Amino acid sequence: MIRRRLLLIGAALGIGLVIMLAENVAADIVVVGRTPFTNGRLGFIDAPDGVLFHFAIAALPMLALALIGSSRRWLWAVAIGMTALFATFAVWQLRQDYLADFAGGANIGLGIIMMASPWITLIMMGVMALLARIIGARSGPGAA
């Protein structure tokens, strides 16, 4: 039980790390057209606390699943998919801002969306799990 949960936690952290690195490598290549880790930077992250924050945002939905011990593959797929979609949206939005030469300054809206993204993902996962349980109960033994 504990070993399985530790394995899930390791998987969650690994998946979060991969998503965070992929997002920032894409930001380097797609947004600014440079090689990743140029001048010690990865994407738009140039501070250790920024790296930890991005990592926490990317790993939180999967970490929540690992901590409750869920091994439902479809829930993991939803968590990974939504996290990857939010990361893709961030790169796309950064590209739009870069093309406009960051005319409006910092994109505060994008920051708020990205900070809310793990919570939005967790809410969607909870709603989907509840719906799956309701549908399963209705179609279980003794259902009409």
Image (cartoon, rainbow, N blue to C red):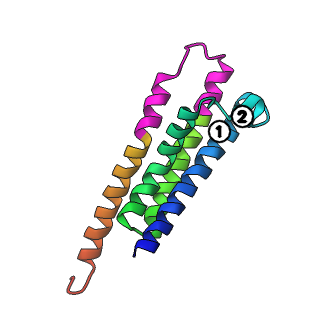
Question: Which residue is disc 2 drawn over?
Answer: 28
Crowd rating for badge 1 (residues with CA inside 10 Å; few <14, some 14–19, many 20+)? many
Label 2 SS: helix
Question: Which residue is disc 1 drawn over?
Answer: 24
Label 1 SS: helix
Mark 2 and 1 residues: CB-CB less than 8 Å, in contact? yes
Q: Which mark is residue 1?
A: none
Residue depicted at 79% across the width and 35% down the height: 35
- Disc 2 to disc 1, C-alpha distance: 6 Å
Residue furthest bottom in the image: 142
Relative horizontal placement of residue 19, taking residue 127 as reference (left or right):
right
Type of amino acid at the residue the image marks with label 2: Asp
Q: Which residues are magenta?
A: 92-116
Type of amino acid at the residue the image marks with label 1: Asn
Q: Position of residue 65 (x, y in %)?
A: 40, 61
Relative horizontal placement of residue 58, taking residue 92 as reference (left or right):
left
Locate the C terminus and report the quarter of the image it occupies.
Answer: bottom left
